[in-house]
Image (cartoon, rainbow, N blue to C red):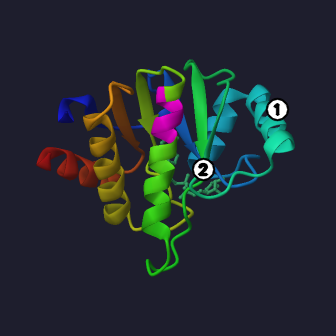
Amino acid sequence: MSERMSVIQGDITKVAVDVIVNAANSSLLGGGGVDGAIHRAAGPALLAACKRIVQQQGECAPGHAVITEAGNIPVKAIIHTVGPVWHGGDGDEAELLEQTYRNCLDLAAANGYRTIAFPAISTGAYGYPKALAARIAVDVVYKYIGIRPLPEEVVFVCFDDENARIYQQYLDLL
Ligand code: AR6
């Protein structure tokens, strides 16, 4: 199963997959970090698509995910999800982060997508400790693909050296 998971270091807007995941905020109107990079690369069509979703169904709560077109990014779709803000770990952060990954995988599978790329959700502005978040990401994906055919391949795209090293360590243990 682990051959269906990999880590690369770089910019998620440049990865050749069917669908990329955006670590958004509840407004879905863009922001900094990976969200800013995705909106800049995708162009105004993405913001318009996000606004339509918010008009139709309201803001996106933490743990939930929605899917849009990809604008100028050469992938088939973008899944926007909202990870938990780290508040010290005594709340429901871990459960919410698990739910975040699972909902993205469900959306990708429901749309028939074979390959998906995730950023390290919540580990930037939202402050989730990188090792704890990576462990959850790897565990949830490993369990998910172990019992389902789609997505066939999951790529973890790490922007920074530390996340890349941590993810590689966890993947090597599988
Ligand atoms: N490709 C891949 N990963 C990236 C990229 C990129 N181009 N740019 C940054 N990262 P963050 P969060 C990494 O802060 O913690 C936004 O303002 C980054 O190094 O983007 O979930 C949203 O609008 C880090 O490891 O997302 C929300 O308000 C990871 O992506 C808030 O930040 C996540 O960092 C969400 O916070």
Q: Is residue 107 magenta?
A: yes
Q: Residue at x 39, y 27 (%)?
A: 151
Q: Quadrant of the N terminus?
A: top left
Name the kind of residue labelled 2 in the image.
Answer: His
- 126 above or below 80? below
Nearest the viewer among 121 and 33 is 121
Q: Is residue 56 magenta?
A: no
Element carrying mark 1: helix
Q: Which mark is residue 48?
A: 1
Nearest the viewer among 2 and 32 is 2
Q: Is residue 71 visible?
A: yes
Q: Which mark is residue 64?
A: 2
- 149 above or below 145? above
Q: Residue at x 60, y 53 (%)?
A: 82
In the image, which residues are magenta?
104-109
Image spot of residue 153 (x, y percent): 33, 27
